[in-house]
Image (cartoon, helix red, strand yellow):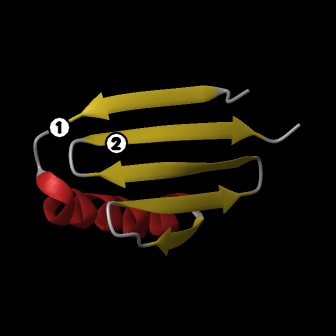
Amino acid sequence: MPDLSIHREHDLGLERARKVAWKWAEDVETRFDMECTVIEGDFSDTVEFTRSGVSGRLIVAAQMLEDESRSAD
């Protein structure tokens, strides 16, 4: 079970949501020493992120963002 789960609806559309998510990924890579991988899809993208002590994924779709993060045991 995720330690943190966030679901947020928006009206950005997929292209604008992608830009926001990719900017977020660049920022957390720099600020928090995270490793991010973007997996593009036709209807949504997945941003996987990891670093020592935490991992998770952000689902980016045309009308919602959903995050599941886990702390390392």
Expressed as whole percent of the image width and height from the top left, the position of residue 25 reads 42, 64
Expressed as whole percent of the image width and height from the top left, the position of residue 56 reads 62, 48
Residues at badges 1 and 2 in contact (C-beta under 8 Å)?
Answer: yes
Q: Disc 1 marks which residue? A: 10
Seen at 77% across and 55% down, the residue is 52
- Quadrant where the C terminus sits is top right
Expressed as whole percent of the image width and height from the top left, the position of residue 2 reads 68, 30
Residue furthest toward the front?
42
Expressed as whole percent of the image width and height from the top left, the position of residue 32 reads 55, 58
Seen at 32% across and 59% down, the residue is 21
Q: Secondary structure at mark 1?
A: loop
> What numbered label is drawn on residue 65?
2
Q: Is residue 66 above or below residue 40?
A: above
Q: What amino acid is labelled 2 in the image?
A: Leu
Please indicate whether residue 63 sits to the left or right of residue 55 in the image: left
Please indicate whether residue 36 sits to the left or right of residue 63 in the image: right
Please indicate whether residue 54 sits to the left or right of residue 9 in the image: right
Q: What amino acid is labelled 1 in the image?
A: His
Residues packed near mark 1 inside 10 Å, few (<14), some (14 to 19) or many (20 plus): few
- Quadrant where the N terminus sits is top right
Residue 11 lies in what quarter of the image? top left
Residue 44 lies in what quarter of the image? bottom left
Mark closest to the chain's N terminus, 1 or 2: 1
Residue 4 lies in what quarter of the image? top right
> Toward the viewer: 66 or 33?
66
Residues packed near mark 2 inside 10 Å, few (<14), some (14 to 19) or many (20 plus): some
